[in-house]
Image (tube, grey):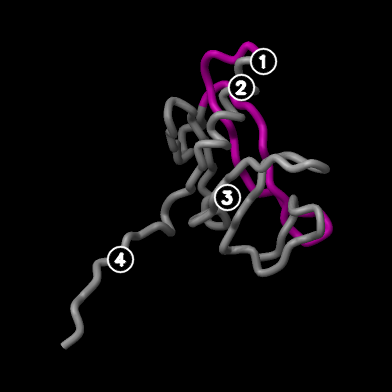
Amino acid sequence: MAPVIEAVNTDTEIAVTPKAVAKIRQTFQKMGVTEGGLRLGVLGGSCSGLSYQFKFDAKPRPTDKVFEYDGVRIFVDPKSILYLRGMTLDYKEALLQSGFVFENPNAKKSCGCGTSFAA
């Protein structure tokens, strides 16, 4: 009989890399933000059907799922969490383009710019 390996359930969380956390913190400092957090969400529309919402919010809504990564809070509404479970938010720097990258296992296809997707 093969040994049983206990799986870690990652489909209920959103991962944020240390680089992304540092960039969010840096952006908040430039904006003078001392409270609140980053709202991640999904909106209908765009070239692939859904697009990512990415903005500062002063406080979470009562129904939000709140994640905290090294002091940086992320707010996600219940509808959006359905499309973002298992996603990793990263920040990449390159010679021609730098920015946040959404690595979303729920995306069946995405547009060339990486900011919209179909689930």
What residue type is disc 2 on?
Gln
Residue 85: horizontal and vertical position, in percent? Answer: 50, 55
Indicate whether 118 appears above or below 53: below
Residue sitting farthest toward the front? 95
Is residue 112 inside the magenta stretch?
A: no
**Disc 2 vs disc 3: Cβ atoms closer than 8 Å?**
no
What residue type is disc 1 on?
Lys
Q: Residues within 10 Å of mark 2 (few under 14, many from 20)?
A: few
Q: In the rendered view, does 66 fall on the left or right side of 2?
A: right
What residue is shown with label 3?
A: 80
What residue type is disc 4 on?
Ala
Residue 84: horizontal and vertical position, in percent? Answer: 55, 53
What residue is shown with label 4?
A: 7
The numbered dot on residue 30 is 1
Residue 6: horizontal and vertical position, in percent? Answer: 25, 67
Real-space Cα separation, disc 3 to disc 4, in angstroms: 24 Å
Q: Give the residue at x 79% y 41%.
A: 95
What residue is shown with label 2?
A: 26
